[in-house]
Structure formats: structure tokens, C-alpha cells
Amino acid sequence: MMSSIEPMNILKRIFQSVSTFRSMQRLVIMLACSIVLVATLLSFLVYSYVSFNQESRERLGALGDIIGADVGAALSFGDEQAVTKSLAALRADPSIKQLFVLDEKGHVSAYYNKNTFMKPADLPQRLITLQSEVKRKIFELSPGVERPIIKDGSRLGTILIEQDEYILTRKITVSTGISVIILLVALGFSYLLADRFQRVITEPVTSMATTMQEVSYTKDYSKRVVASGTDEMNQLADRFNEMLTEIERRDVNLLERQDQLHHMANFDALTGLPNRVLFNDRLEQALLRATRTGEYLAVLFIDLDNFKLINDTHGHRTGDQLLLETASRLAAAIRADDTLARLGGDEFTIFLQDVKTPENALSVARKHIEKLFQPYQIEDKRLFVSASIGVALFPEHGATAETLVKNADSAMYLAKEKGKNNVELFTDSLHERLSEKLVLINDLHRALERGEFELYYQPRVNLTHNSWTSAEALIRWRHPELGTVSPDKFIPLAEQTGLILPIGEWVLKEACRQLHQWHCQGFPLARISVNVSPVQLQRQNLLGIVKEAITSNNICPRALELEIVESALVENSGHSIGILKSLQGIGVKISIDDFGTGYSSLSYLRNMPINILKIDRSFLIHVHESREDNQILAAIIAMSQSLGLDVVSEGVECVEQEQILISHSCQEAQGYYFARPMPADKLLQRFMNTSICLEELPFHSAECAKISCCMLMQSTASPNGQGSPLLCRLIPDHPTD
């Protein structure tokens, strides 16, 4: 078993040492040929040996018969000398090693030995050895034969004859030499044939292997294998080429998809301009070059003014076409070294390289402003859109792309605050202002939870009776670190962030609660007024919040006045008017606050659900010094009263302003001249400690509150929300006797 395993291990090691398919195939062919040739050679040598042995035996037998006939007569007479003399002729034949002539009794009558120096004493032993070797038929290099001596039909004795071993050895050696020469020649010829055969057989396979290596290294899937050889090899080549074709097709598709993904990742889908990612990458590279060369860069942040109005009015398709035209105008006005990108929406950015001075960057920005302000012809529409641009410089305003874009964005918002269609350069003061704004926004999110808001109240005076008619609730923010923050600072931030919704709801409910508390404390103030943001009017369920505030605090709806700025009535006017009419329907008073600072149109007041008009303090500042201001004030009061509106003037700070208002028959006024805004307890204390008169309630407070609360709850609970007309009829417009 072990002898069969070892050759197999040797063959495995031989094959493992071969690294190429071609060499392995050549080795297999050579091994097969060698095995066949060696087996053939061995068979030939065995056959030659057997043939030579048989031939020698036949020759010795014939020679024995001749010698027997020659010595037969002498042996019959017992003449041993004659027999010996006859054997002397054998010396001429070198192939005879030795010969024995035995009589009929088996005794040696005569003998011949090629070695003349053989001792007589060795004769018996040699005879015995020869007799035993004669019995062997094969596998003897010195064959011997035994032949009888017969004379006239009688056996007279026996001849034992042995051939010298060198005869057979020489023949076998010659045959082996010739065979080895033939073997070597055959092996050489076999090697040539094996090399040729393996080339014919393996050429298609090696060609495919070579092609695969080239494809693997070069990634060129257009290469093909030429079909050749047998049907099987042709099929293999065809399948391989089909595989390469499929890989090539997929590779092309993959490259196309990679290009698409790269384009989608780095370019804007609408305009084809670089997007934020590519813009930042190019800007970072430009900053590295500018750092080495010491040149200046400028980043322009461009935002279209009122673009949302274009989308809302004409649709997004028109908006997209306008953006394409905007991108085209900007691209036509930049240099080859500059980069234009669209960050998203209506925001574009440009960075300018090799800027000499800040004025150069501002000059370029102004040119863009002029180009963008030109009319846009979108299909059959002629549109006008302006832009606001912020500018930040490297290295003065930042050393990274993120910082420069952020600062340019901040400067752009400053340009919008200053009236839009403008260019602003970033400054450190702007950065401080924005940082402060960010801090306020963060703190504003937690101010309501922490109870940092407080309501102040400023009384409103009836100029005819010199009595308090109501008080306006004004919010104050007690910041734990900054102290008192002006409403002018945090109210716009609250509107921008949407925090005005919970803050406004809290103000409304807190003002109603405070009014109810004053009534319980014996301070029967007729009405409380609360400012309502346009954001609340558009986004909040204002009617539901007002109903909840009235019912939960058990006050009469006529005791609540909501102050709305003019812009709230113009924006989404249908929605706004509907809400205000519903509020009027439950008895709430509606007033226009800061009249004259917004649209200032008396014509739209006729159709608006308004009860009171509050004239802005700007009309009173110089009214006692300017005749024109006096006339304007008189006209506003007269026209408002002709429309059936009550008139309140804000910002009264001196007796002269009071007297002018009285002369123009203005019903009510408020301002520092009468009282500054104060906390609720201070207002109560002032009422209790002074002889201030209060305007009589235009309703029976307790009865009105009871009826209105009942009806409001029914209105709220009804599926269709109706019930206001019944409530209006139950609450009279004038006091009852």
C-alpha cells in the first residue's frame, strides 16, 4: 500500500511545482510518453533476453549432438584419449565455457573447460553445478544443455555443455544500448510533439487567459478572443466573448451612472450650476491658492427678493424659468476664474478671485444687482424681480469656505432689512449683532417655560370725560443675564421662529385672567386690549383661543379688544377678514394698531370688520409744531369718525398734543403724558390711591359674562361652530337701564 502511495505523492509534488497550464500539459504528455517508452523498452529487453537464451540453448543442443556423434565410436571402445582429443577442437569456439562427456554410468570420460588452469579437484563440484543449471530454462546468463550420446540406437553416455555468460551479456548490453538510444531519440521527438500538441490544444485557452489578464490590468472590456480549434473551444470562446460583451455593457452603464451620480452630487438639477458641495470644494481650493499667493477673494451671497410671491402667484414652472434666466444672467457676467453656484431655492453664490479692494467686490455686486433688476420675459409674462447681495472678503471676514459663506449670508440679510435690492459688506458689528440675535433666539425658546415674561399695562384715557376706558397689555422679557429686553428686539425674532404662537396665546390668556382678577379686587376696568401678531392670525386657531380665554376667566367678550396691524389685513385678506368677523360676532372689539405706518388706506377700512382705529404716535410728534401734521391728523380723525370708527391716538407726551386731539374730537388717547406702562399691581395701586375715574362699563359685567360664557360653550360644542348671531343679540351694544 505504501509503495503505491509514494509514487502518487511524488507525482503531486511534480505537478505542484509547475505554475503554468502549458508547462503542466507538456509535463503530462512527456510523462505519458516516457512511461510508454520505458515499458516498451523493458518489454523489448525481456523479449531479447528470452530469445537470446532460447537461441543459445538451441545452438548448444545442436553442438552437443555433433560432438556426441563424433565421440560416440571412441566412447563405445572406451578410448578416453580419443574422446579428449575430439574435445580439443572446442578451443576454437570461445562461446563454450565448459563441456563434460559422461559414460553410460555417469562417470566423466572427458571434459573441456575454457579455463585451462582449472584444478582437477574442482571437477566434481563443477559437474554438480552444471547439472543443476541445465535444469533451469531461463534467467541464466550462461545457459547449459544436456544431450544424450547414441550409437546404433544405443545410449552410450551424456554430454553436458555450458555457454560462456559473456555471450548473452554482450547481446543484452548491445540491445540495451540500442534501446536507450532509441528511447532518448523517441523522448526528444515526443517532447517536440508534446510541445506542438500542447500549443495546438492550449492556444485558445492561453489566449483567453492572456485576454483576461489584459482586461484585468487595463479594464478594457472591448477586447475579444478569436475562436479556433474544436467545437468545444469555439463554444468556450463564444461564451467568453459574450461575457466580455455583457461586462462591457454593464461597465458602460456603470460609468454613465457614475457620471450621473457625480453630476447629481455636484451640480444643481435645474440650472446645471455647481451646487453647495462643489462650490465649497472649489472655494477651499481657491483659498489654499490665495493663502500661498497672498491674493484676496470675495464671496457674494445672492438672494432674489420676494421670489416666493412669484411662485405663489404664477406657479413653480414660471419660478423655475425665472431661476434659469437668473442663472444665465449671472453666468454671463462672471469671469472664467470665478465660480457661480446655486445653493438652493432662490439663493446663488459667487466667489471672485484676485480681488484688489473691497470696492471692487462691491462694484461687481452692484453690476449683478442692475442686471437682475432688468425685466424678465417669461412666456407671456413680464416680471420684475430684484436681488439682495451680501459680500464677505478673504482673509478679513473668514479663512474657511463655511465662514465666508455664512458671513456673506448674514450681510445679505442686512441688505434685505435695509429695503432689499441692495448690496451690503459684512462687518464685525454685523457679526456681533447676529451673535446677539442667535443668543436671544436660543433663550427665547426657554423664556416661556421659565416664566421670564411679564405683562405691563398702559391705561387709555377718554379725552371727553378724563377717565380710564381700558388698558393695553404690553409684554416684557426679564432676561436673567441681559435684564429687560425690549419688545422691538424679541417680538420680530419670535415671529420669525414661530414662537410668537405660544407667546401670543399666553399673553391673551394672562391679560384675560388679570382683568378678571381686577374685577374681583374691585377694579372694574371696562376693557383690556391685547396685540395680536399677523402670524397668529394666519397660523393659529385664534377664535378658539379667544373663546377659551373668555370662558375660563369668566369675562364678557366686550371686555376684550384685539389690536391688529394693517399688514395682517392685507396678507391673505379673505382668511383674516373671516376670522375677525367671527371674533366680532362673539362681541370682541377689533382695532387697527399703528395706523399710518403700513398701507394707510382708508378706502379698505369700509369693508373691514374694524371697531377702533389707533393713530400711530408718529403723527403726534410734531403735531403741535407743524401745521401740515395737524391738518393730516384732523383729516384722519374726521374720516375715521365718518366711517363709524372710534379713534384712539397713541404717543401723547404733552398737554399741547392732548389739547389738539380734544380740538379734533378724538375720543381716546394713551401715552406717557397720562401714564407709563406698569405692572398689574402698580396699576391697581395707582387706581386705589388716586381719584382716577373709570369709564362706565357698556354692559352689565356679571350678567354679560354669565350669558356670554354659556353661549360660547354652546358655540364651541356645536358641530358647525355656529351660535355667534344669538350671542350678539343677547349682548347689547349699549348699557341697559
Image (spheres, grey):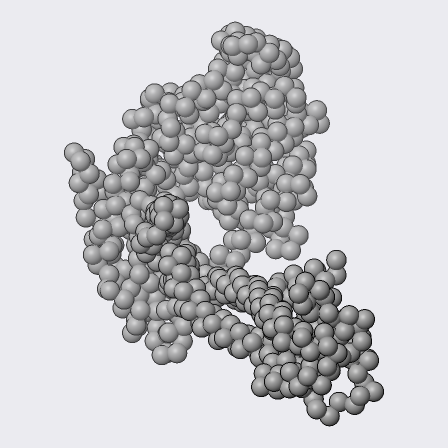
Q: Position of residue 52 (x, y in %)?
A: 58, 70
Left or right of 394: which side holds 486? right
Residue 574 x/y as whole percent: 37, 23
Task: Name the quarter where the N terminus is drawn.
Answer: bottom right
Q: Quadrant of residue 473?
A: top right
Left or right: where 41 falls relative to 138? left
Viewer-proximal residue, 630 or 566? 566
Extreme residue in the front direction? 77
State how many labels appear: 0
- Residue 285 place in picture, x, y as percent: 39, 68
Which residue occupies the extreme bottom position in the image? 117
Residue visible at 41% across and 23% down? 575
Residue 72 in the image: x percent, y percent?
67, 73
Vertical side of 90 occupied by 435: above or below: above
Quadrant hosting residue 666: top left
Question: Which residue is pictured at 60% across the width and 67% down the height?
Answer: 58
In which quadrant will I find the C terminus?
top right
**Residue 282 in view in this figure:** yes
In the rendered view, tell whether residue 203 sits above or below residue 323. below
On screen, residue 118 above or below 728 = below
In the image, 299 versus 413, the foreground residue is: 299
Residue at position x 62%, y 63% from top?
Answer: 12
Q: Is residue 370 visible?
A: no
